[in-house]
Structures are given as C-alpha cells and as structure tokens.
Image: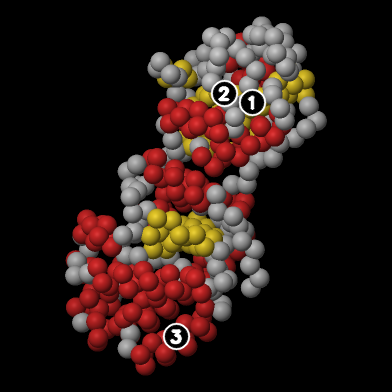
C-alpha cells in the first residue's frame, strides 16, 4: 500500500513580486514536502480580514510521505526561508507568503498547532475557487460534500478574479526520468529503496535475481573455484534481464526503477577474479555493455562498512555471514573509481549511513528530497 498521502494546500502572497513568491513556494514544497501534482490558476482577491494589498492566491495538490504535523513544520520552514516575518499583531496582516494545509487525505485532526480540515476554508471564496478548479470532486471530511458543492453553498461574496499569469508545476520523477538505477554496496539498502520508490510512484520494478543463482552459495564456500562461473552467470542473467525489461520500457516511455545496474558485474568481477580471468571477462562485458540500456539517473547509496555488516547480519543470508570490512571497502572503492570515470553516467551519491529510511518516514523523505534536487545532466552518448 502506498505511503503517499494526497494533500491540498492554499498559497497566497500580497507583498513584493507575488508571482515569484508563489513559484518559489511551489518549488520548495515539491522538494521538501512532496511531489506537486496539480497547480491551480492564479486568482486575485482583496485582502481578507484586514485592510492591505491585494492577494494572489492558488491551491495545489501534492503527495507526501510526511505526517500532517511534519508537513506543517516544513511549511513554517519554507515560509521563513522565503521571507515571511513573525506576526506583529494578533490579527491578519500583509505577508510575503502564506501557506495553509486545507486537507490531508480524509483526515480529521485537532491539536493546539494544527486543525485539519482547515476550519475556515469553507468560508473563503479565495480558497474554494482555486481548490474547486483542481479538486472539485474531493469530499470534505467533515462536511461530507464535494468541493464544488461547498463552493456553491459558500456565503462569502468576495470577488475572486482569474489572472492571466500562470505558474509552473515542477516536473515529477516520472517526467524527469525513464529509468533510475539504485546501486550500493552489499547491505546498503538498494533493494528496499527501489521497492519503496516503485510502490509510491507506481512504476515498473526490476530486481536483481541473485537468489536464483546456484553458484552464489558455492562461491562463498570456495571462491577460487567458483568465482568465474559465478561472475559469468551474473553477467549473462543481468544482460538478459535488463535488455528484456528496459528496452520495452524505453519504447513505451514508462518509468522504471531497478535495484542494480549492469556495470556492477565489472565491479565484483574485478575484486573476485584472477587477472587473466578478469581480462577475458572484461572483454565480454564491454561487448554486452554497448547494447545495454543506460539509466537516466544512477544513484549510489553509501553506507559505512560497520553499518553494512549490521544489515548483512540482520537479513541472515547464511552465505554472506563471512563477509568482512576489508572486502566491503574494496567493493566501495571500486564503485567510486568506476563512477567517477564513467562520464556517460548521470549519477548522485547519497550517504545513508545515519538514516533508516525503511522505518523512519523523515529519513525516506530526506532521500526523496535529495533525489528531486539532483540537476539533470545532459549526456551525449
């Protein structure tokens, strides 16, 4: 079941370059809180509840993994970064940016700091008009009526004027990339992260079929004897799996996430094979690599070796229990060497040594934030 919660926010500004403030807020929300799915038109209204400059108002629909209280914390942080000053009066006043949580999925929530749904949203045309544009069929959790019906029943007579100006919806991961590969050392959490991302963004997931490899347990018992057989079997299986799945996805332009990329074959082979074996292996690899679909984004998860060993021990695969720190450090260094030399790769290294993104929603959101903030690199192949 998806961990993403559909949330509606109201944004307004009546100071300075109002459009720019709204766009900056949208971009910050997309990066820090959750993917922006919809952005309403811009509407102009007079100040509500006090005498001040006219406001520009919008509503947006987002998806977030954060709790409603965490969303509020991020909103306060964003408002502060964008220049909103601390209130000087008890009433309403001019502001650079104002962001309110209107609805958080179908939740009804009361605390000293936060009430959901927003207690005054049904009294305000400047909220309901843009919200109706993007969520007319959404059912208000308390009123039990659609937003379109709530708008018709609203007694507020304030004029809400449609503006010609338009704001830009930030691109989602789906729109930025066709294929993301998640990599990392043994026990780094690449499969867990790939599964979580694929689940939340409803994408095709390609997982390495290492458990089906009959040579893997034998390799850990007798590395010298079974190393070449193991690496060749992995190489051919990865080549077949990536080509079968990714070529179809490339044609249909569907979003795909995998928990490995083909070049990991070369990384592990270099560590495990004898010099003569590796040279033969490398020749075969390079022929295959030319035909393999390359990821639009390659993410390498870095974990400290001690933490890797903890994770390896926890998952309990018998044949992995004799892995030592030295081996993990060697694998890590080979990854870095290859990544830095592979100028065809659009890559990012994310340190997850102090994160538990499986159990901690904030840590998972931090990784999403880092991924969204990656600047796409244009590569000529």
* Label 3 residue SS: helix
> In the drawing, what numbered circle is on residue 96?
1
Q: Which badge, 3 or 1, is on the more N-terminal residue?
A: 1
Corner quadrant of residue 130: top right
Foreground label between 1 and 2: 2
Residue 143 visible in rendering: no
Position in image of residue 185 (x %, y %): 35, 65
- Quadrant for the C terminus in the image: bottom right
Q: Which mark is residue 282?
A: 3
* Residue 177, disc: none
With 78 as the anchor, is 193 left or right in this view? Answer: left
**Quarter holding residue 218:** bottom left
Residue at 64%, 8% in the rendered image = 49
User: Gap in Å between the C-alphas at discs 1 and 2?
Assistant: 8 Å
Secondary element at image label 2:
loop
Q: Nearer the viewer, residue 122 or 212?
A: 122
Judged left or right of residue 168, residue 267 is: left
- Kindly indicate whether the residue at mark 3 contacts the one at mark 2 (C-beta within 8 angstroms): no
> Disc 2 versus disc 3: distance between alpha carbons?
60 Å
């Amino acid at each position: 079941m998806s961990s993403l919660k559909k949330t509606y926010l109201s944004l307004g500004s009546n100071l300075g370059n109002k459009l720019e403030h709204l766009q900056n807020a949208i971009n910050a929300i997309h990066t820090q809180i959750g993917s922006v799915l919809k952005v309403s038109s811009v509407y102009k209204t007079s100040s509500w509840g006090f005498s001040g400059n006219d406001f520009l108002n919008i509503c947006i629909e987002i998806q977030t993994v954060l709790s409603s209280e965490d969303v509020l914390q991020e909103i306060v942080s964003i408002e502060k970064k964008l220049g909103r000053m601390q209130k000087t009066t008890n009433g309403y006043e001019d502001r650079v940016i104002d962001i309110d949580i209107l609805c958080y999925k179908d939740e009804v929530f009361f605390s000293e700091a936060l009430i959901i749904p927003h207690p005054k949203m049904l009294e305000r045309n400047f909220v309901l008009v843009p919200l109706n544009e993007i969520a007319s069929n959404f059912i208000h959790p308390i009123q039990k009526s659609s937003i379109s019906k709530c708008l018709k029943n609203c007694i507020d007579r304030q004029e809400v004027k449609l503006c010609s100006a338009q704001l830009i919806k930030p691109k989602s991961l789906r729109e930025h990339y066709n294929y993301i590969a998640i990599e990392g050392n043994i026990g780094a959490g690449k499969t867990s992260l790939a599964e979580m991302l694929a689940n939340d963004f409803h994408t095709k997931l390609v997982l390495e079929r290492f458990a089906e490899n009959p040579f893997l347990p034998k390799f850990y018992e007798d590395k010298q004897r079974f190393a070449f057989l193991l690496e060749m079997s992995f190489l051919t299986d990865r080549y077949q799996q990536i080509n079968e799945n990714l070529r179809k996805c490339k044609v249909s332009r569907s979003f795909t996430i995998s928990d490995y990329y083909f070049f990991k074959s070369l990384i592990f082979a270099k560590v495990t094979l004898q010099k003569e074996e590796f040279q033969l292996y490398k020749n075969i690899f390079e022929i295959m690599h030319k035909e393999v679909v390359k990821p639009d984004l390659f993410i390498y998860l870095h974990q400290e070796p001690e933490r890797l060993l903890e994770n390896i021990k926890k998952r309990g695969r018998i044949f992995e229990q004799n892995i030592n720190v030295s081996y993990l450090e060697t694998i890590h260094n080979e990854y870095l060497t290859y990544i830095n030399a592979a100028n065809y790769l659009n890559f990012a290294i994310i340190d997850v040594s102090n994160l538990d993104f499986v159990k901690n929603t904030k840590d998972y959101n931090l990784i999403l934030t880092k991924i969204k903030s990656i600047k796409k690199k244009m590569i000529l192949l």
